[in-house]
Amino acid sequence: MRLLQGKTALVTGVANRWSIATAIARELHAHGAQIVLTYQGERVKDEVEKLALELSNALVVPCDVSDEASLAALNATIAEKVGTIDTLVHSIAFVKKEDLGGKVYDTSRNGFALALDISSYSLIALVAHLRPSLNDGASIMALSYYGATAIVPNYNVAGIAKAALEAIVRYLAYDLGERGIRVNAISAGPIKTASSRQVAGFSKMIDKVTEASPLRRNITAEDVGRTAVYLASDLSAAITADVHFVDAGYHAMGMSPA
Ligand code: 0WD
C-alpha cells in the first residue's frame, strides 16, 4: 500500500548516506511521497544531490537554519517549485565537540546558545517560515533522543537542547492543531552517524541498548524511517504533541539486567 501517494515531504538534515534523514527520505519516497531535500552548505551538497537522483530527482534546496534569509528563500522556492508540503522532517542538531563530554557546568554561554539555536530553536524557525507552505492536516516531526529526559553521560548540552526541542514540539502542536497540523518527536535509539560519533563513548551506548533493551537489539535508521512513514501518513491522524520512542524499548527499562 502506498500510504503517502500524492503527498510531498520536505526532509532536512541529510549530510551523507548514514544520516537518519537519508533513511527517512528513502522510506517516505518508497511509500509514494514526492521528496524535497535541503542541505546546509556546499560541504554536503554533492551527497544530497546524489541521494536526490535516487528519489525520482527530488528537488534540492539550500537551507541553513541559523540564517533567516536562507529560511525565507526556502519557503519561496517551495512555493514556486512544488506549491505546498504535507510533511516536514526536522533532523538537525549541532553541538560543539567540547560540549559532548566532560562536565555540563563547563559548557560555555556561547556553546549553549549555539546548541539550542541549531538543535531546538530551528524547529520554530522552520515552522515560522514554512507556515504558508504547509497544508492543513500536515505532519511535522523532529528527531529527539532519550537524553532529553534522562541523564545520559556525555550527551550533556545535547540532552538539554533535546528537552527544549520536545517542549517546542508540544507547544507547536497546540498552535498548529487548529489547522489539523500534527507535530511529534521521534526519540531514536543510538545510530552511528557523523553527529553521534562526536559524543564521547558513543559505541558503548549502542552496546548497552543491544544488551539491555526489551528487544535485545539496537535500532537502525530504517526503523526510524518506517516510523516516519507512519507519522507522515493518515494512519497517525489523531497523534500529536507526542514523543514516540524508536529504541527497541530501552527507555522503559528501570534497571539494566544483572
Ligand atoms: O544516534 C543518533 N544518531 C541519534 C540522532 C539518536 C537520536 C536522535 N538523533 C538526532 C540528532 O540529534 C539530529 O537531530 O537525529 C538528527 C539527525 O542526526 P544524525 O542523522 O545522527 O546526524 P547527521 O547525519 O550528522 O545529520 C545532522 C545534520 C548535520 O550534519 P553535519 O554532519 O553536516 O553536521 O544536521 C544538519 C547537518 O546537515 N545541520 C544543519 N542543517 C541546516 N542548518 C545545520 C544548520 N545550521 N547544522 C547542522
Image: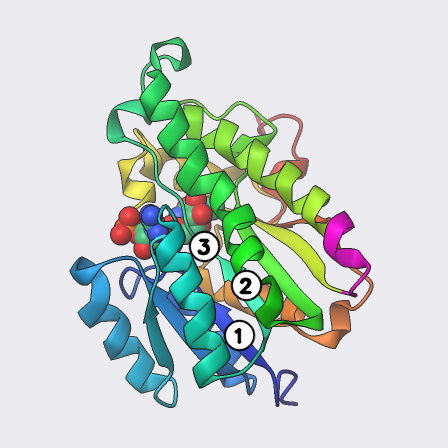
189 and 64: which is toward the camera: 64
Q: Name the residue under label 3.
A: 91
Task: Determine which quarter of the picture holds residue 52.
Answer: bottom left
Asked if labels 3 and 1 touch by Cβ distance under 8 angstroms, the answer is no
Q: Can I make out residue 126 in this image?
A: yes
Q: Name the residue under label 2.
A: 130
Q: Earlier in the sequence, mark 2 or mark 3?
A: 3
Report the number of numbered marks.
3
Tag 3 secondary structure: loop
Q: Horizontal and vertical percent for residue 148?
A: 56, 32
The magenta segment: 174-180
Q: Which mark is residue 9?
A: 1
Q: Which of marks 1 and 2 is nearer the N terminus?
A: 1
- Answer yes or no: disc 3 within 8 Å of ligand 1: yes
Q: Closer to us: mark 1 or mark 2?
A: 2
Question: For the N terminus, which image quadrant?
Answer: bottom right
Q: Which amino acid does label 3 sit on?
A: Ser
Question: For the C terminus, which image quadrant?
Answer: top right
- Disc 1 crowd rating (10 Å Cα; few below 14, some 14-19, many 20+) is many
Q: Which residue: 44% across, 41% down?
A: 119
121 and 149: which is toward the camera: 121
Q: Which amino acid does label 2 sit on?
A: Leu
Tag 1 secondary structure: strand
Q: Horizontal and vertical percent for residue 127?
A: 57, 56
Asked if labels 3 and 2 touch by Cβ distance under 8 angstroms, the answer is no
